[in-house]
């Protein structure tokens, strides 16, 4: 039950960039963009949709065990790549919101633990001889 709650929370927070579809002004606070051109807005809104799909997959994995590891692994990869592309640049890091800087690393750790626990629980224990 705890795992479902944790994964649901991680999934919902992961999906929040999709709000930029309805409130493009969130791009300013989320990405530090003062006056983005239309293509940049469209690309970031598209990213929001992809984040919503990833968040939905994480939530699905909370309730459907076969989806748990693929969803968690995909989130670990995508969040790690985003951090690798942005955090290494001091200028970009300064423009990032606190949620990305704090939530993504925490989510990576949580999702890694989810995968480890999944495989530990699925390993059959040897019967005593």
Image (cartoon, rainbow, N blue to C red):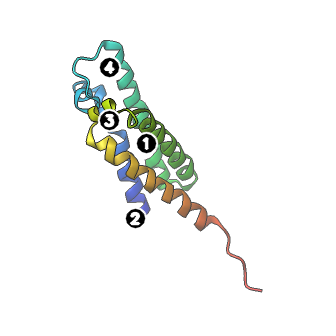
* Left or right side of 38 for 56: right
Disc 2 residue crowd, few under 14, some 14–19, many 20+, Cα 10 Å: few
* Residue visible at 52% across and 46% down in the picture: 71
Q: Position of residue 124 (x, y in %)?
A: 68, 70
* Left or right side of 105 for 22: left
Q: Nearer the viewer, mark 3 or mark 4?
A: 3
Q: Position of residue 59 (x, y in %)?
A: 43, 49
Q: Nearer the viewer, mark 3 or mark 2?
A: 3
> What secondary structure is found at the residue carrying circle 1?
helix
> What secondary structure is found at the residue carrying circle 4?
helix
Q: Earlier in the sequence, mark 1 or mark 4?
A: 4
Q: Nearer the viewer, mark 1 or mark 3?
A: 3
Q: Residue furthest right?
A: 129
Q: Which mark is residue 65?
A: none
Residue 12 appears in view: no
Quarter of the picture containing the C terminus is: bottom right
Which residue is disc 2 drawn over?
A: 2
Which residue is disc 1 drawn over?
A: 56
Which residue is disc 3 drawn over?
A: 93
Q: Nearer the viewer, mark 1 or mark 4?
A: 4
Q: Distance from label 2 to label 1 (Cα)?
A: 18 Å
Disc 1 residue crowd, few under 14, some 14–19, many 20+, Cα 10 Å: some
Q: Distance from label 4 to label 2 (Cα)?
A: 37 Å
Image vertical order of residue 108 relative to residue 96, above or below: below
Q: Earlier in the sequence, mark 2 or mark 1?
A: 2
Which residue is disc 4 drawn over?
A: 41
Q: Distance from label 3 to label 2 (Cα)?
A: 33 Å
Q: Distance from label 3 to label 4 (Cα)?
A: 19 Å
Q: Earlier in the sequence, mark 3 or mark 4?
A: 4
* Residue visible at 54% across and 47% down in the picture: 73
Tag 4 near tag 2, CB within 8 Å:
no
């Amino acid at each position: 039950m705890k795992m479902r709650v944790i994964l649901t929370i991680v999934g919902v927070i992961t999906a929040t960039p999709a709000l930029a579809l309805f409130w493009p002004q969130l791009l300013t606070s989320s990405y530090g963009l003062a006056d983005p051109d239309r293509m940049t807005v469209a690309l970031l809104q598209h990213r929001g949709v992809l984040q919503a799909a990833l968040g939905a997959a994480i939530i699905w994995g909370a309730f459907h065990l076969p989806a748990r590891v693929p969803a968690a692994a995909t989130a670990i990869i995508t969040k790690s790549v985003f951090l690798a592309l942005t955090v290494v640049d001091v200028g970009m890091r300064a423009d990032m919101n606190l949620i990305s800087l704090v939530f993504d690393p925490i989510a990576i750790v949580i999702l890694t633990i989810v995968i480890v626990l999944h495989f530990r629980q699925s390993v059959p224990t040897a019967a005593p001889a």
